Amino acid sequence: LAASRVEAPIGPGKLADGTDIPLLANIGRPSDIADALLRGAEGVGLFRTEFMFLGTETAPTVAEQQEQYRTVFAAFGGKKVTVRTLDAGSDKPLAFLSTGHEENPALGLRGIRATRAHEEILRDQLTAIAAAAAETDADVQVMAPMVADAAETEYFVTLARSLGIPVAGVMAEVPSCALVAGQVLGIADFVSIGTNDLTQYTLAADRLLGSVAAYQDPWHPAVLRLVKLLGDAGIQSGRPVGVCGEAAADPMLAVVLVGLGATSLSMAPSALADVRTELRQHTLEHARALAVRALDAASAAEARAVVRD
Ligand code: PEP
Ligand code: MG
């Protein structure tokens, strides 16, 4: 990328009162690294590992995975890299984790459910991540997708630690996870909110279906109330609660998410500059006041309108 295409300012994510809100990148493969670094990502908040294996028929070996992960970790030396374990199923089918036809794949054996059913694949992946992390000085942590509750959190965190990864969290993208946020954060080291799926499941609208696309709006106060449950549990437990769904890339919504308790935001690298600029115009107190107004709105459109005004 030509430097001239990168919009200023580059620098850490901060509110007007100096509160740090680290701005991280969502990446899917090693080729995304350069863009993230050039645009000033302070680390990786979501490494979608399944993107590297979408065309693969057989499960990748530990050695194959280790090599790919090492490339990413080495590029972010000294920085946080949050690796999501394979999120297979529904919109991201993986041949080697496929479970055959499902009537409603978004409600099927996907995310942690699929890798738990094939635990050897999850073990191999965590082993490869631990080995690659040991070869670099990146600050590597793992998280599992589609975790529903505290019991699933316990399963994943225990497995990750037993395989040499000390910092393990979960994605909150199923409403049940938000409803028991306190229990989940009693176990997980951190939570990262996946607003794309959280919106899909809260509004019961398939995120791939054009006819219900209007429901896929993370400004909906019902989604924001679930984010608040997670944010409040983060404050209570003293553990980080980030957001890595598309919502974090909308500058005004990013401010609201911070007001609801988000401690970091992860997004497509192209969104970093605008979110960075917007955050610097608001104090935490102001972000919280905007969040209260959005929570009280009667619709996504009204929440957006009251905050923009
Ligand atoms: C999400 O659901 O918000 C998320 C970040 O994960 P993905 O978009 O990869 O499902
Ligand atoms: Mg998701």
Image (spheres, grey):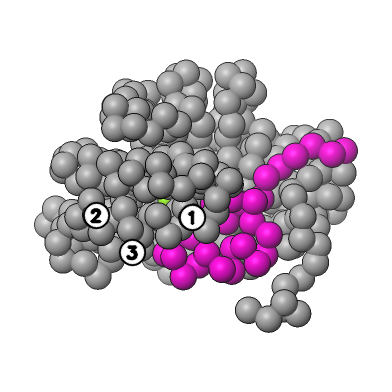
The kind of residue tagged 1 is Ala
* Residue 21 magenta-highlighted: yes
Residue 207 x %, y %: 42, 59
Per the image, the residue denoted by label 3 is 52
- First in sequence, mark 1 or 2: give its number: 2
Residue 12 x %, y %: 74, 50
Q: Mark 1 and mark 2: span between their CA atoms?
A: 16 Å
Whether residue 195 is visible here, answered yes or no, is: no
Decide which of 308, 281 is in the foreground and name it: 281
Per the image, the residue denoted by label 1 is 74
Residue 170 x %, y %: 43, 36
* Residue 24 magenta-highlighted: yes
Quarter holding residue 6: bottom right
Contact check, label 3 and label 1, Cβ < 8 Å? no
Q: What segment is highlighted magenta in the picture?
A: 17-44
The kind of residue tagged 3 is Met
